Image (cartoon, rainbow, N blue to C red):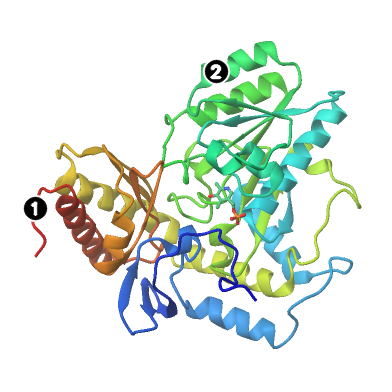
Amino acid sequence: MSSQPLMNTYNRLSVAFERGEGVWIYDTDGHKYLDALSGIAVTGLGHAHPAVTRAICDQASKLIHCSNLYTIPLQQQLAEKLCAVSGMDNVFFGNSGAEANEAAIKLARRYGHQKGIDLPTIIVMENAFHGRTLATLSATGNRSAQAGFEPLVSGFVRVPYDDVDAIRQVAANNPNICAILVEPVQGEGGVHIPAPDYLNQLRAICDQQEWLLMLDEVQTGNGRTGRYFAYQHNAILPDVVTTAKGLGNGVPIGACLAHGKAAELFKPGSHGTTFGGNPLASAAALAVMDTIETEGLCEHAAALGDYIVDGFRTQLGDAPYIRAIRGKGLMLGIELTEAGTELAVLAKVKGVLLNITGGGRVVRMLPPLIMSQNEADLMINTVSQLIRVYAGDERSE
Ligand SMILES: *Cc1c(COP(=O)(O)O)cnc(C)c1O
């Protein structure tokens, strides 16, 4: 056995957690941390939410797994609920964001072939993140994540994010385009929020060109930005939307939703999965969706997100080392003028979990949707002070 039994895929911080409750998580030495990252937008209901725990325990005692060769009533119920909340027509369930996006990419290719395009091509964005499987890595706009894994999957062309003219240019020059795949807010890329009418413009182009508009809501979905799905801020319907992270509050599940012509593309045998939409994951996701609805967590995320952005702007807004403070609901980013990679470790020492993204310059927070205003104040004050000390503006106490 190797001295390092885990493959070397993460630079992990030296802390291990053993339990959590709400926004709090406790390490093996009993220290308590404010989880302002939610396991990267996963535990939107906080840790050990009783409704999710109950759903998982009840279901585990009845039936955890059932093949998709059979009817799975909980999966059907979950699909109905997702369609009702999204305005979409049907759903394919996988186990992760990457799998949800793989399904979307396959839908787009099938759609292209149906239109007589032999080499269907999807427009993707600079700085996009869509996952780590070969197709989703190829769609991802991060050269360092791709380097060494060539040959990449073909059939993608890349344009700058939030640049409608660049897409019009591709439309005029590339007859193989059949779809656009885009995040409504770029998460891993550094919490980039496009112009308010960006998605409306993309919808108009897709209608005109007869392309599929495919939204990657793996991170932005499930209430994160203050609506169930981020496209609902724009009053449009995509043809395909994918989600995962927050859907199971930690139980792995991914979903690819389709509408209209995109909902008719798969036939039995077109796509499949062993685990996707199993009774356990479906029960957990149903509990998550019920809780988001009954506790009004989308509205809460919208209001608390505005409050937090205001708080950070008051504390840090004028400082010369701050480039921008961005937020949509509880997707929050503080962009520094210089790299601040060490801030994740320093925040951990101060009892707050967050991460650094966007090329090392964006302090990212994705707090649970259930966060209270007092907990938000604690996060704003701790993180603001940390950044001031780090920038040399203030001495540590
Ligand atoms: C996290 C993420 C993915 C990948 O999800 P996995 O569950 O890690 O495969 C895809 N797209 C976006 C926008 C993400 O944030």
Q: Amino acid at mark 1?
A: Glu
Nearer to the camera, 362 or 262: 362
Residue 263's spot in the image, x, y percent?
A: 78, 43
Q: Element at badge 1?
A: loop
Labelled disc at residue 394? 1
Q: Element at badge 2?
A: helix
- The residue that disc 2 covers is 166
Q: Nearer the viewer, mark 1 or mark 2?
A: 1
**Label 1 CB, ligand 1: below 8 Å?**
no
Q: Residues within 10 Å of mark 1 (few under 14, many from 20)?
A: few
Nearer to the camera, 30 or 206: 30
* Real-space Cα separation, disc 1 to disc 2, in angstroms: 44 Å
Q: Residue at x 68, y 69 (%)?
A: 282
From the viewer's perspective, is 70 left or right of 31?
right
Q: Amino acid at mark 2?
A: Ala
N-term mark: 1 or 2: 2
Q: Looking at this view, name the residue that lies furthest to the top.
A: 172
Q: Residue at x 70, y 53 (%)?
A: 99
Q: Residue 264 lies in what quarter of the image?
A: top right
Residue 166 visible, this orientation:
yes
